Amino acid sequence: MHHIHPSLVHGVQNVKPSNLKDANQDAAAEGLSSAVDYSHPDKNNGDVQQGIHGHSHLGALADSKWYKELVPKLESLASKHHVGNFVALRGTNETFFESMPIYARLGMHLLFYGHEQVKLLEGNSRIEELLKEQSIKEGKIYDSPESVKNIPSFIKTYGISLDELAEPDISKYKNFNEFFSRKMKPDARPVANADDPRGFCSAADCRLVVYPTVDLAQKFWIKGDEFSVPALLAAQPDPESPLCQSLSGGALAIFRLAPSDYHRFHSPIDAEVVAIGEPIPGQYYTVNPQAVNEPKMDVFSRNKRQVLILRHTLTGKEVAFIAIGALLVGSIGWTVQPGQQVKRGDELGFFAYGGSTCIAIFPPGLMAFDEDLVKNSEGRGVPAPALHGNGPIETYVKVGMSLGRMPEGA
């Protein structure tokens, strides 16, 4: 069971910043900067909800001009629009509500204020530089030794269990980011159907959507009209390249990690690590579903990211695994190297602070996703609350849980 702290559950559906046309975009920019500043324990007294993890109340920040300008307008929409996302809890007919913390809400506002996202993508460098600047600043704050003071509040806010950690003694962590990229005990994430060589498993503790083809992913989930396999891979921009050709028409799994999640990612297949591409520079947009679902806004192929290629042991086919940064994500780290053999569930790498996403692209015919995951991703599975709109919904899964299986005869 995934535990959501009671203070995080409030509101209803789809707080589009375009509903706040009278709110000042400069107030959102100031707000993001202030919230990041208040993530430092010298200012928040170790309470993460006094900074970027705040929701309705931000303590000392409540007296600031931007708070008075913007936050009441966000909160005034609570009776009509939610400020988060409903997620299906796998193995049940239940959903839980994942609230969107203040930094993500401000990031959304900066992107979509007054339907200005097209202008943004045409080169509004001021906003792009702000998101990058604040993301780098947050990484430095959480790398500082003083940031350990934030760990107890973070654990309490997100209901994080220490029992499954390789190092449950929080006094042993040197800074917040070290705790954020914490390791699990070896048996904390068992691999489902480990003896079945045709099986695949979840790569992360995450909110997951899966689609048998990229076209279906674009129909149900990724609304940005620029999304494509070559654009996502970037280092292989030629649509005629062997890698792009081999993945064309393939299956797609999108693993979205929220701040509360374990932030190491693992191999979904038995494979050899073929290559790790150079970091692909990009933006620091939020990867919240409300941004991913926005037309004309492809955050995945615009954000900073890095591509790892895995060669499936059983078939020799190549799978692309993309780690994508996001708003306030400090860095992407790899713990494998080319030539290394990995089993399903073996660690590949980790994210430093922030919500982030991994995408796996499987060549056609290699992957048949589990039916419950497909149904939820297409809006035919666990019924979402009426406020959600009864459309596609993410499924909460953990590392090692079954993702699917290679079809017979493949």
Image: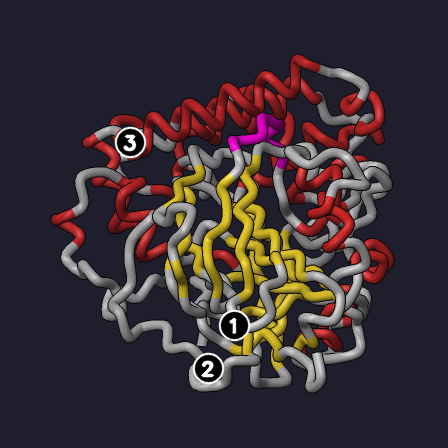
Q: Quadrant of the C terminus?
A: bottom right
Q: Is residue 141 left or right of residue 332?
A: left
Residue 199: % across, % down: 55, 79
Secondary structure under the numbered disc 1 in the rendered image: strand
- Which residues, given as a range, are shown in magenta? 278-285
Disc 3 and disc 1: Cα gap in Å?
A: 32 Å
The kind of residue on which mark 2 rests is Ala
Q: Which residue is mark 3?
A: 143
Residue 344: % across, % down: 44, 69
**Is 280 contained in the magenta span?**
yes
Residue 390 lies in quadrant? bottom right
Q: Is residue 73 visible?
A: no
Q: What's the mark number on residue 322?
A: none
**Image vertical order of residue 126 relative to residue 334, above or below:** above
Foreground: 257 or 400?
Answer: 400
- Check whether the beta carbons of the residues at disc 1 and disc 2 lie within 8 A of each other: yes
Q: Is residue 94 visible?
A: yes
Estimate how packed mark 2 is, as few (under 14), some (14 to 19) or many (20 or more) residues with alpha carbons within 10 Å: some
Estimate how packed mark 3 is, as few (under 14), some (14 to 19) or many (20 or more) residues with alpha carbons within 10 Å: some
Secondary structure under the numbered disc 3 in the rendered image: helix
- The residue at the point 56 percent across, 43 percent down is 307
- The residue at the point 50 percent across, 49 percent down is 274
- The residue at the point 45 percent across, 73 percent down is 400
- The residue at the point 62 percent across, 62 percent down is 317
Upstream in the sequence, badge 3 or badge 1?
3
Q: Which residue is mark 2?
A: 192
